[in-house]
Image (tube, rainbow, N blue to C red):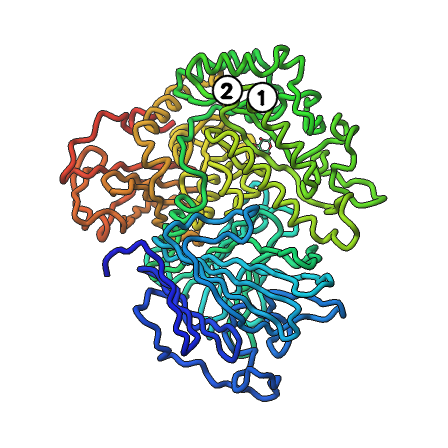
C-alpha cells in the first residue's frame, strides 16, 4: 500500500456501519438496534465485512431492553451510561428535572466533514488538515438530551480524535455529573495498563500492570493535571515491549482535573473511560448552551512502545504544538541566587554567559516588588525598585545589545494577600464563602473562571512583554486548588469552576500567543506538574522537574518520553552537590546530560570553576553543532521504560537517520564489570555508519548485533556515542568531539 496522507470515512447505509481509516489505521462503528457499537480498532483494513461477529450473548437475568438479543452490559458500546442495563463505568451521567439519569442514547443522524471541525474554539484541538470528521448525533427516548460524538481520523498518523458535545433539547436545566471524552470497550482484557504517576520532584514514574477484575483509576482533583498523574495511558498486549507488539495509547488535550478508569467486568471484558474527573464536577446544562468535553487522542501501533511514542511525538509536534521556533540555550537565575536577583547581578553575568555560548538570559522568580522569598507579592508584576532601580527595560536592552534574548519568570495565575491586586479585588481570588482562605506556598489562586480576571491577565502580560521587549516567558504554576469556589458563580454552578478555570487559562495563553507570535513560552508547574496535551498546545518547551540531578532528570524525561517529544524537554547544567539531594555527580555526566532537548545552565556562569566553564562551553558548542538531533530529533528508548528506571539508554537520530547519538545514564554501578550490548534497532539498514570517528559498521549490523556500551566508571555516569552515516554523505564537519567536552572528573 502506498503512502496516502488522506483520511477516509465510509458509510454503509445497509449495515449502518462507519469505517474510519487512513493508510495505517481503521476504526469501525456500527449502529445496532440504535446503539452505537465499536466493531474494530486496529491496523488499516481495506474493508470490514464483520467476520468477527458480535456474540448474541444474553446472560441470565439481563435487563430486557430493546437491545435484545444483546445484553447492553456485554456490547462494546461507544458512549454509555448507568441506565437501561449497562453496569460498567459510565462515560456520562446527566440528570433531568426529576433528578433522574437520562440514558440509552440512540443514533439519530450523522455528518461527515473535512478536517477537524472544532466543537468549541476555546479548548485545544489538533490541527488535521488532511483528516476527516464524523459527527454522530444521539438522542435519548424522551428527546431531552442530544449528545454529539465527534471522531476525527488524522490523515498521516494512526490517530483518532474523539470529543463529545452535549445539548439540552428541553427548556429546563439538566445537570451533567460525568463527562468523559472517550470510552473504549474491548471484548477481552488481555492488556497491561501503563501509567505515569508521581509527585513533585518525582514526576512521570512508569508503572506497568496487567488489567485485573475491578477498576483501576488514575486522575487529578488538584485543579491542574498534576504530577500525581498524567492524563495519558497505554494498553499494551502482555508480550509488547519497546520494539514489537500491539499497543493503544490514549491522551487528553486538557490541563485540569481528569480521570481515567480501566475496568475488567464480570464477563472479563474491559473498558477504558477517560475525561473530566467526576469528583468536584457538576455542570448546569442550560437550554441552548452546548457543553464540550476536552478532545482525546487515541493512537495505535503493532510495532511496540517506541513506535507508539513516535506516533505521539509526531502528533504533538505536527498537530498540536505551536508552529516550530528555535528554542534557545538558556541561563536561568533560579538555582544561582533563588529570589536574590538584581539588575547588577544579571548584567554582571552577560559577558561570561555569552562566552559559554548562552543565547537567552532569564530572570527567574524574585524580580518583582516585595518578593524576598515565597511569601512575597504575587499579582502585581511590578519590578522591585531596589533590585531593578531602572525597571526591566535597561536589562533587556543590555542583553539585546549583545545579540542575546531576554526572558522572565511569571506565575500569572496566582495572587498573594499582601498584593495591591488583592487589596483592590479580593473577589478575584478563588475562595469558599465565609471560610478562611487556605494558602499553599503562601499564595491563593486567581479565579480564572471569571472573564474579567482573564482580561486583566491578558492586559498585564501584554504590557509586560511589550514594554520590556521580552522574548521568553517561563510560565509557572506552584500550587493546587483547595477551595475551588468562585465568588461570582451561583451555588448550583460551583461544580463548574475547575472546567471554567482551565478554559479561561487557555483563552489567556492563546491571546498572548496570537499577540506575540515570536514569544517563546516555557511550561512549568513546580517542574513537570502540568505537562499534558493541553499545555503543549500553547507552549514551546517544559521544565520537566525541579529535581535537577541529571541522572534522575533523565529518568523523569524517560517516563514522559512515552508520550511527549524530545523538543519540549529542558535540561540545564546544574551544581554539584545538587541543590535538591546534595548528590555529587561527575562533571562529565552533568555536562553530557544537559544536552538533551533544550540545553542551558542554572549555575552562575561567572562562578564556574575553570573545569566547569570548559565543560559547559564545549557541551554548548557540541549542542549547536548537533542541534537538529538533540533538540528536534527522533527519540527511541533502547531499554524498557518500566524496568530499572534509573538506567536510561536513548537513541536520538535526525529524521533521515544519517546522524545518531546513543546516550546512556546509569545510577549506582555494580562492582562486577558488566558489559552491556544494546541493539540500535532504528538505524537505516542500508547505510553504513562511522562510530565515534573511528570504525565503520552497517546500520543492519548495528540494528541487529548492536554495540557494546562503554563500561560505567563510578556511580552516576553517562556516555555518548556518535554515529554518522558515511555511505552517501560527505565526512562530518569538524564538530567538537566528546573528548573536548570534558574528561571524567
Ligand atoms: C518553581 C519552578 C522553579 C522556579 C521556582 C520559582 O518551583 O519549578 O524552577 O522557577 O518555582 O519560585
Q: Between residue 36 and residue 333, name the one nearer to us.
A: 36
Disc sitting over residue 337 in the figure = 1
Could you tell me which residue is drawn at 39 percent across and 23 percent down?
A: 616
Could you tell me which residue is drawn at 49 percent across and 29 percent down?
A: 519
Q: Are marks 1 and 2 in contact (CB under 8 Å)?
A: yes
* Residue 258 in the image, given as x and y percentages of width and height: 60, 54
Sequence order check, earlier mark of 1 and 2: 1
- Distance, label 1 to label 2, CA atoms, is 8 Å
* Residue 599 in the image, given as x and y percentages of width and height: 42, 30
**Image-quadrant location for residue 416:** top right
Q: Between residue 272 and residue 549, name the one nearer to us.
A: 272
* Residue 532 in the image, given as x and y percentages of width and height: 52, 46
Instruction: Let me know if residue 561 appears in the view.
Output: no
**Image-quadrant location for residue 325:** top left
Number of labels in the image equals 2
Q: Is mark 2 within 8 Å of ligand 1?
A: no
Q: Quadrant of the C terminus?
A: top left
Question: From what the image shows, is residue 559 above or below residue 523?
Answer: below
Q: Is residue 110 left or right of residue 243?
A: right
Few, some or many residues within 10 Å of mark 1 (<14, 14–19, 20+): some
Q: Residue furthest right?
A: 434
Q: Quadrant of the N terminus?
A: bottom left
Few, some or many residues within 10 Å of mark 2 (<14, 14–19, 20+): many
* Residue 326 in the image, given as x and y percentages of width and height: 39, 30
Could you tell me which residue is drawn at 45 percent across and 45 percent down?
A: 320
Q: Is residue 565 left or right of residue 726?
A: right
Look at the numbered disc 2 and give the secondary structure of its residue.
loop
Instruction: Let me know if residue 23 appears in the view.
Output: yes
Disc sitting over residue 604 in the figure = 2
Q: Is mark 1 within 8 Å of ligand 1?
A: no
Look at the numbered disc 1 and give the secondary structure of its residue.
helix
Could you tell me which residue is drawn at 23 percent across and 40 percent down?
A: 658
Amino acid at each position: 500500500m502506498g503512502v496516502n496522507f488522506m483520511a477516509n470515512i465510509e458509510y454503509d447505509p445497509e449495515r449502518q456501519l462507519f469505517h474510519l481509516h487512513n493508510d495505517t489505521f481503521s476504526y469501525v462503528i456500527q449502529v445496532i438496534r440504535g446503539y452505537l457499537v465499536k466493531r474494530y480498532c486496529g491496523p488499516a483494513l481495506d474493508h470490514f465485512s464483520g467476520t468477527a461477529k458480535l456474540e448474541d450473548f444474553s446472560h441470565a437475568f439481563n435487563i430486557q431492553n430493546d437491545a435484545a438479543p444483546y445484553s447492553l452490559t456485554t456490547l462494546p458500546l461507544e458512549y454509555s451510561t448507568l441506565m437501561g442495563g449497562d453496569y460498567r463505568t459510565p462515560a456520562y451521567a446527566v440528570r433531568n428535572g426529576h433528578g433522574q439519569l437520562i440514558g440509552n442514547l440512540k443514533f439519530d443522524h450523522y455528518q461527515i466533514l473535512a478536517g477537524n471541525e472544532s466543537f468549541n474554539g476555546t479548548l485545544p484541538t489538533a490541527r488535521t488538515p488532511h483528516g476527516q470528521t464524523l459527527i454522530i448525533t444521539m438522542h435519548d427516548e424522551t428527546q431531552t438530551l442530544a449528545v454529539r460524538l465527534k471522531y476525527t481520523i488524522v490523515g498521516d498518523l494512526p490517530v483518532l480524535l474523539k470529543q463529545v458535545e452535549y445539548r439540552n433539547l428541553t427548556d429546563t436545566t439538566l445537570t451533567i455529573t460525568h463527562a468523559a471524552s472517550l470510552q473504549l470497550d474491548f471484548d477481552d482484557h488481555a492488556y497491561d495498563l501503563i501509567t505515569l504517576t508521581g509527585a513533585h520532584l518525582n514526576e512521570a514514574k512508569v508503572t506497568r500492570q496487567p488489567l485485573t477484575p475491578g477498576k483501576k483509576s488514575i486522575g487529578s482533583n488538584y485543579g491542574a493535571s498534576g504530577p500525581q498523574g498524567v492524563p495519558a495511558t497505554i494498553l499494551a498486549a502482555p508480550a509488547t515491549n519497546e520494539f514489537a507488539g500491539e499497543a493503544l495509547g490514549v491522551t487528553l488535550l486538557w490541563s485540569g482535573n481528569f480521570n481515567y478508569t480501566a475496568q475488567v467486568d464480570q464477563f472479563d471484558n474491559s473498558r477504558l473511560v477517560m475525561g473530566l474527573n467526576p469528583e468536584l464536577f457538576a455542570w448546569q446544562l442550560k437550554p441552548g448552551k452546548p457543553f464540550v468535553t476536552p478532545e482525546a487522542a487515541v493512537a495505535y501501533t503493532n510495532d511496540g512502545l517506541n513506535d507508539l511514542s513516535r506516533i505521539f511525538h509526531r502528533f504533538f509536534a505536527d498537530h498540536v504544538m505551536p508552529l516550530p521556533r528555535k528554542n534557545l540555550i538558556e541561563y536561568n537565575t533560579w538555582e544561582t541566587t533563588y529570589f536574590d536577583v538584581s539588575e547588577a547581578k544579571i548584567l554582571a553575568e552577560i559577558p561570561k554567559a555569552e562566552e559559554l555560548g548562552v543565547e537567552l538570559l532569564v530572570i527567574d522568580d524574585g524580580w518583582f516588588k516585595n518578593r524576598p522569598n515565597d511569601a512575597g507579592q504575587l499579582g502585581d508584576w511590578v519590578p522591585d525598585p531596589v533590585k531593578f532601580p531602572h525597571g526591566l527595560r535597561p536589562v533587556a536592552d543590555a542583553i539585546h545589545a549583545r545579540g542575546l534574548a531576554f526572558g522572565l519568570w511569571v506565575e500569572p495565575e496566582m495572587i498573594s494577600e499582601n498584593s495591591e491586586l488583592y487589596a483592590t479585588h479580593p473577589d478575584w481570588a478563588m475562595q469558599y464563602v465565609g471560610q478562611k482562605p487556605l494558602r499553599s506556598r503562601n499564595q491563593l489562586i486567581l479565579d480564572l473562571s471569571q472573564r474579567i480576571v482573564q482580561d486583566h491577565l491578558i492586559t498585564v502580560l501584554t504590557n509586560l512583554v511589550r514594554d520590556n521587549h521580552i522574548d521568553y516567558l517561563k510560565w509557572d504554576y506552584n500550587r493546587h486548588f483547595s477551595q475551588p469556589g468562585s465568588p461570582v458563580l451561583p451555588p448550583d454552578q460551583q461544580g463548574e469552576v475547575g472546567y471554567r478555570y482551565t478554559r479561561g487559562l487557555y483563552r489567556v495563553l492563546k491571546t498572548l500567543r496570537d499577540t506575540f507570535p515570536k514569544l517563546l513560552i516555557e511550561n512549568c508547574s513546580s517542574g513537570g506538574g502540568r505537562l499534558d496535551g493541553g499545555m503543549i498546545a500553547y507552549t514551546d518547551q517544559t521544565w520537566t522537574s525541579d529535581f535537577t540531578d541529571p541522572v534522575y532528570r533523565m529518568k523523569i524525561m524517560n517516563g514522559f518520553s512515552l508520550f511527549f517529544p524530545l523538543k519540549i524537554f529542558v535540561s540545564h547544567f546544574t551544581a554539584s552537590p545538587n541543590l535538591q539531594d546534595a548528590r555529587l555527580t561527575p562533571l562529565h555526566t552533568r555536562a553530557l546530560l544537559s544536552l538533551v532537548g533544550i540545553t542551558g545552565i542554572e549555575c552562575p556562569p561567572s562562578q564556574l570553576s575553570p573545569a566547569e566553564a570548559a565543560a559547559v562551553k564545549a557541551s554548548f558548542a557540541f549542542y549547536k553543532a548537533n542541534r537538529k538531533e538533540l533538540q528536534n530529533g527522533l527519540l527511541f528508548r533502547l531499554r524498557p521504560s518500566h524496568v530499572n528506571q534509573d538506567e536510561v539508554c536513548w537513541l536520538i537520530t535526525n529524521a533521515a537517520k544519517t546522524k545518531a547519538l546513543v546516550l546512556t545514564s546509569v545510577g549506582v554501578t555494580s562492582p562486577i564489570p558488566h558489559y552491556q550490548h544494546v541493539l540500535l534497532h532504528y538505524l537505516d539498514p542500508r547505510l553504513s555508519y562511522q562510530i565515534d570517528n573511528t570504525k565503520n559498521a552497517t546500520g543492519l549490523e548495528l540494528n541487529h548485533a548492536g554495540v557494546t556500551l562503554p563500561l560505567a566508571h563510578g556511580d552516576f555516569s553517562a556516555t555518548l556515542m556518535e554515529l554518522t552515516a558515511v555511505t552517501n554523505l560527505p565526512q562530518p564537519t569538524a564538530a567538537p568531539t566528546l573528548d573536548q567536552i570534558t574528561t571524567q572528573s
